[in-house]
Each structure stands twice: as C-alpha cells, then as structure tokens.
Image: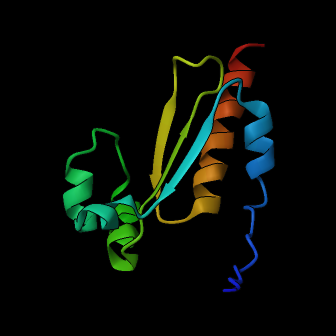
C-alpha cells in the first residue's frame, strides 16, 4: 500500500468572510498560465481586466498569477481581480463589497 502525505492546507485568513458575503460563487485560480506554458506577460495579454503596473510587475517578477472571481449579488454579475498575492486579492474583493454595501445605504 502506498501512503501519500499531503501538506496542511492554509486557508487565507479572510476567505471565509468573502465566501459568506457573496451571494454566489468565489473562485481562486493560482498560476493557470503555467498550465499552458505561458509567461505572465503572455497570459495577461489575453485578459481584459485593468491591472496596476506595479502589481503586474510583481506578478512577472514572482511568476505568480492569482485570479479571484466573485459574484457579490447574483450568479450573473461578477468581478475579477488579478494579483500576485492571494491575501491581497481577497482584501481588494472585500473592499469592493464594502463599497457596494456603502452605496446601497
């Protein structure tokens, strides 16, 4: 019998809050560009989402793409955030939710 040991999974600290506050799904993909043998630059050329220059530069330096997609209100309207850090992407998503909440008052 072959025994496989998996490392413990670290859940980003505010991920449960993001999931709880969204009315539909939350999806996080990490380094999908590597699955198609692309560089960060090649992968991001195909994306239409705006991204800050410093964030893109850090993604290139670390060869890391975090893609966070979340549906705050319905299964139709969603946001996509690209970053190099999962925690920071989650923080940006929560800031968007806070903005929505403030506007609905």
Residue 5 position, x and y percent, is 71, 83
Count every numbered label the image shows and give the total. Answer: 0
Compared across the picture, whether 53 is left or right of 17 comes to left
Q: Quadrant of the N terminus?
A: bottom right
Left or right of 84? Residue 61 is: left
Residue at 80%, 44% (x, y): give it: 17
Residue at screen point 22% across, 65% down: 38
Q: Is residue 99 above or below residue 74?
A: below
Relative side of 100 to 40, left or right = right
Is 38 located above or below residue 104 in the figure? below
Please identify the residue farthest to the front as the structure is shown: 1
Residue farthest toward the top in the current orientation of the protein:
105
Residue 55 image-quadrant placement: bottom left
Expressed as whole percent of the image width and height from the top left, the position of residue 88 reads: 61, 59
Instruction: Classify the position of the C terminus by image quarter.
Output: top right
Front residue (pair 102, 65): 65
Would you say 78 lies left or right of 87 here?
left
Which residue is located at x 35 percent, y 78 percent? 61
Tell me where residue 20 sits by quadrant: top right
Question: At x 35% / y 62%, what residue is drawn?
Answer: 56
Q: What is the image's colouring?
A: rainbow
Residue 33: x and y in percent read 32, 61
């Amino acid at each position: 019998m072959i025994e496989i040991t998996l490392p413990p999974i670290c859940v980003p600290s505010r991920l449960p809050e993001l999931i709880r506050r969204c009315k539909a799904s939350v999806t996080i993909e990490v380094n999908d560009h590597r699955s198609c043998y692309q560089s960060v630059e090649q992968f991001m050329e195909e994306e239409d989402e705006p991204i800050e220059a410093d964030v893109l530069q850090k993604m290139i330096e670390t060869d890391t793409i975090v893609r966070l997609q979340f549906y705050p209100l319905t299964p139709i309207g969603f946001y996509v955030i690209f970053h190099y850090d999962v925690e920071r992407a989650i923080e940006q998503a929560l800031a968007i939710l806070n903005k929505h909440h403030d506007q609905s008052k």
